[in-house]
């Protein structure tokens, strides 16, 4: 009886080990494998490897204390060709760095290893606000995303002069 139980245990251990080592095919292959490069199926197949997290209260207080801004948000347009960065000014003196026309803003995506810049239009100029900041007002700037390198769900870093905000998730 003991030999039978030992043999049964050894057989299940071997079968379990073989199952763990065998490769498992994905149950939902990417949409590109089926030749569907666009549409709703490919939008559902994309998902972020990051957990959606809200900015902690400590981080919010730090941005207000150091830079005079809060409510940082990065969002993609429907076409995906532009990425919009918005923020609210709480302390105009500290927030001058973000609205300084001489400071060049950059958006870096570690996942895509791409640096995005604010596009400059011939008659309009750079697509960003650069005026004297006022407390309680929202400000924005737009980054060019040609080739859709940065997608919703990606984390990005923003650099504007000495200002930096790391790990902001694109909505």
Image: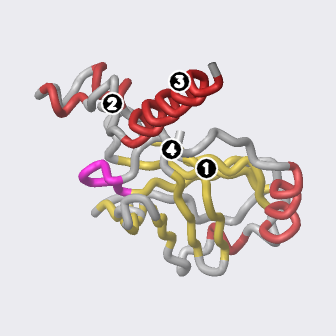
Q: Is residue 120 above or below residue 50?
A: below
Query: Circle 3 sits in a helix, a strand or a loop, which is it?
Result: helix
Labels 2 and 1: the sequence-earlier one: 2
Q: Is residue 121 rendered to the left or right of residue 59?
A: left
Q: Which residue corresponds to mark 4?
A: 49
Q: Is residue 76 rendered to the left or right of residue 161?
A: left
Q: Residue 15: x percent and y percent?
A: 43, 31
Please identify the dominant SS of the magenta region. Answer: loop
Mark 1 vs mark 3, foreground winner is 3
Query: Circle 2 sits in a helix, a strand or a loop, which is it?
Result: loop
Discs 2, 1 touching: Cβ within 8 Å: no
Label disc, if present, on residue 8 of the rendered structure: 3
Labels 2 and 4: the sequence-earlier one: 2
Label disc, if present, on residue 26 of the rendered structure: 2
Image quadrant where residue 165 sits: bottom right
Q: State the CA–CA distance, disc 4 to disc 3.
A: 40 Å
Discs 1, 3 touching: Cβ within 8 Å: no
- Which residue does the image show at 31% across and 60% down from the upper left? 121
Quadrant holding the N terminus: top right
Labels 3 and 2: the sequence-earlier one: 3
Labels 1 and 4: the sequence-earlier one: 4
Q: State the CA–CA distance, disc 1 to disc 4.
A: 24 Å
Mark 2 vs mark 1, foreground winner is 2
Q: Which residue corresponds to mark 1?
A: 86
Mark 2 vs mark 4, foreground winner is 2
Graded by Cα atoms within 10 Å as few (under 14), some (14 to 19) or many (20 or more), the crowding at tag 4 reads: few
Q: State the CA–CA distance, disc 2 to disc 1.
A: 38 Å
């Amino acid at each position: 009886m003991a030999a039978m139980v030992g043999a049964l245990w050894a057989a299940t251990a071997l079968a379990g080990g073989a199952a763990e080592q065998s490769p498992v095919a994905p149950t939902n292959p990417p949409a590109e494998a089926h030749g569907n490069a666009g549409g709703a199926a490919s939008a559902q197949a994309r998902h972020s490897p990051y957990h959606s997290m809200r900015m902690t209260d400590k981080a919010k207080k730090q941005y207000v204390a150091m830079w005079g801004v809060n409510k940082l948000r990065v969002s993609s347009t429907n076409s995906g060709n532009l990425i919009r960065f918005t923020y609210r000014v709480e302390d105009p003196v500290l927030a001058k760095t973000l609205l300084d026309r001489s400071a060049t803003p950059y958006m870096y995506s570690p996942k895509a290893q791409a640096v995005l810049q604010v596009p400059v239009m011939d008659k309009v100029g750079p697509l960003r606000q650069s005026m004297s900041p006022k407390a309680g007002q929202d400000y924005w700037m737009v980054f060019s995303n040609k080739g859709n390198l940065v997608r919703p769900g990606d984390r990005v870093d923003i650099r504007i002069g000495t200002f930096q905000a790391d790990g902001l998730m694109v909505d």
